[in-house]
Structure formats: C-alpha cells, structure tokens
Image: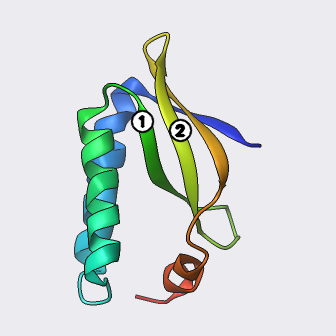
Amino acid sequence: MHTFTIEQADAHRFGSAVATHIRARADFLTDEMHALWWDLYVSFRDACGSGTVDVPRDAAHGIPVILHAERYWEDEEIRVRVKGVLRPQWREFMKGEF
C-alpha cells in the first residue's frame, strides 16, 4: 500500500490541474469518465471532509494509473492512502498522446 500527502494549500491547485486535464481531453472523455474526473475536481477543490475519490497519480517515466484512494483530514493536511488500482481500462486512455 502506498501513502502520499497533498498539502492543504495545494488542494486547490491539484483541483485546477484536474480541471485542466478535463478540458484538454474533453473530446476523448466518455460521459462516465467526465463525471468521474469532475467528482475528483470537486473533491479536491472543496478539500474538506472525508470520503473515497479516484486520484490520478502519474509515476515519473511510468504509466499513469487511476488509483482508488481514501482521503481524510489529519493535522491540517489531506492524506491520501492508496487502496489499489481502479478501472484498469483508464490506463490505456491515460497513456494516449493528446
């Protein structure tokens, strides 16, 4: 299991990056994919509470994967604990050159 942290101050920037990703790939997203990415954006834009979100994690020089992560508050930071890979079909989508 991997654990990584997104600082509270970075949550909005992360949300903005997701929104940019949505716009950049709008022509390639199915309605379901768009809804999932939008949910992710809203989760990090609001950066409050707890719950389960789909988090894109780009490995350096690796294959981007969609991870199923649980987000919760701890000492004024957002800690994201990766549970496992979610929706393997997204890997092919994320590898594309857009």
The location of residue 61, given as percent across then percent down, is: 70, 70
Residue 13 is drawn in which quadrant? top left
| Secondary structure category for the residue under label 1 | strand
Inspect the image, locate mark 2, and give the three-letter code of the amino acid beneath it.
Answer: Glu
What scheme was used to colour the molecule? rainbow
Q: Which residue is mark 2?
A: 70
Q: Which residue is mark 1?
A: 51
At 24% from the left and 89% from the top, the residue drawn is 27
Residue 43 is drawn in which quadrant? top left
Among all residues in the image, which is located at the extreme top? 75
Q: Is residue 2 above or below residue 49?
A: below
Inspect the image, locate mark 1, and give the three-letter code of the amino acid beneath it.
Answer: Gly
Contact, mark 1 vs mark 2 (Cβ under 8 Å)? yes
Q: Is residue 86 above or below residue 31?
A: above
The location of residue 72, given as percent across then percent down, is: 47, 26
Front in this rendered view, residue 18 or 90: 90
